[in-house]
């Protein structure tokens, strides 16, 4: 399927200074783990995820490397059975701070639990990963690249393959505090950047009952993801919201514990194999 290419300038009007300030405040909550991991996930070959390195790391383009070449045993905590395999031999994963913990040696000391090993378990051989705290599709923090431009930059460098977009938490917060770019426009931005290649979104979930990052706001984002599936046959949505458990969350109600990140990494990889299996094809939008 061919999509009309929409420029970033067309889709993203300037946000007034007052609104930008409010957004910057809201981003601080979702970026409690202000970390950045940029590059391909190859057996722990990530930049050290500390706040001081976030700006410097974001200036370097992601580099393709083979995904972990060992077939580490799956943790089984999420799925309880042998993973399927995916047709996505090459994969680009773009995420926010809820992805940082899945590639961080501090959060997951065992490389077999990290995202690269989990993707390798289901058949991904070439993996590009860019995870950055506070990231949204539209807005940017200092020294950061937003999700849309990460995808555009990778395509310009020759990336061709499937996509996983683990974004939306910060976008939801930004819309809630007054961004002029709505939820569906943000989804359209990323789908346009994918150029018709298979895309799996990871939907959102928090434990918060109020504020920009409330679970009610996250549900509005999740609903729009499902609506977008009707427009994009190449799109699937992993229903992380349905399986997420309070015990996997850090005290802020947004991020995760080490155990939660281990579950999340395995679950996302397994969902990719269900969304785009190596044999046959999936039907419907939601993957559980």
Image (spheres, rainbow, N blue to C red):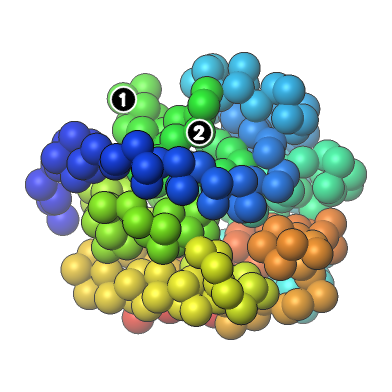
Query: Where in the figure is residue 222, as x and y percent of width and height?
Result: 42, 73
Horizontal side of residue 204 vs 35, given as left or right: left
Q: Is residue 69 visible?
A: no
Q: Which disc is residue 156 wearing? A: 1
Q: Looking at the picture, does residue 208 appear above or below residue 170?
A: below
The part of the image, by quadrant, that contains residue 199 is bottom left
* Quadrant housing the C terminus: bottom right
Q: Looking at the picture, does residue 133 appear above or below residue 191?
A: above
Which structural element holds mark 2? loop
The local crowd at label 1, few if under 14, some if 14 to 19, many if 20 or more residues have their Cα within 10 Å, is few
The residue pinned by badge 2 equals 141
| Disc 1 to disc 2, C-alpha distance | 22 Å
> Toward the viewer: 264 or 274?
264
Q: Is residue 61 visible?
A: yes
* Quadrant housing the N terminus: bottom left
Which structural element holds mark 1? helix
Q: Are dots 1 and 2 in contact, CB under 8 Å?
A: no
């Amino acid at each position: 399927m061919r999509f009309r290419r929409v420029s970033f300038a067309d889709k993203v009007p300037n946000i007034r200074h007052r609104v930008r300030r409010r957004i910057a405040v809201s981003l601080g909550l979702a970026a409690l783990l202000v970390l950045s991991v940029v590059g391909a996930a190859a057996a722990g070959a990530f930049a050290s995820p500390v706040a001081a390195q976030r700006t410097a790391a974001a200036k370097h383009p992601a580099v393709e490397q083979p995904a972990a070449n060992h077939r580490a045993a799956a943790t089984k905590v999420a799925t309880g059975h042998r993973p399927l395999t995916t047709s996505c031999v090459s994969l680009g994963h773009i995420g926010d701070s809820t992805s940082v913990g899945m590639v961080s040696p501090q959060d997951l000391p065992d490389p077999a639990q990290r995202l690269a090993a989990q993707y390798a378990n289901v058949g991904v051989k070439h993996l590009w990963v860019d995870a950055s705290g506070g990231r949204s599709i539209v807005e940017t923090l200092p020294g950061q690249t937003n999700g849309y431009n990460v995808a555009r930059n990778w395509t310009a460098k020759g990336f061709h393959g499937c996509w996983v977009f683990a974004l939306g938490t910060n976008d939801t917060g930004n819309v809630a505090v007054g961004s002029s770019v709505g939820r569906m426009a943000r989804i359209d931005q990323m789908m346009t950047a994918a150029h018709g290649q298979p895309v799996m979104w990871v939907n959102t979930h928090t434990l918060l009952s109020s504020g920009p990052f409330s679970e009610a706001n996250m549900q509005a984002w999740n609903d729009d993801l499902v609506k977008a599936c009707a427009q994009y046959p190449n799109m699937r949505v992993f229903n992380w919201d349905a399986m997420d458990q309070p015990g996997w969350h850090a005290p802020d109600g947004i991020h995760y514990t080490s155990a939660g990140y281990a579950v999340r990494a395995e679950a996302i990889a397994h969902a990719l194999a269900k969304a785009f299996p190596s044999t046959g094809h999936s039907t419907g939008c939601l993957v559980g």
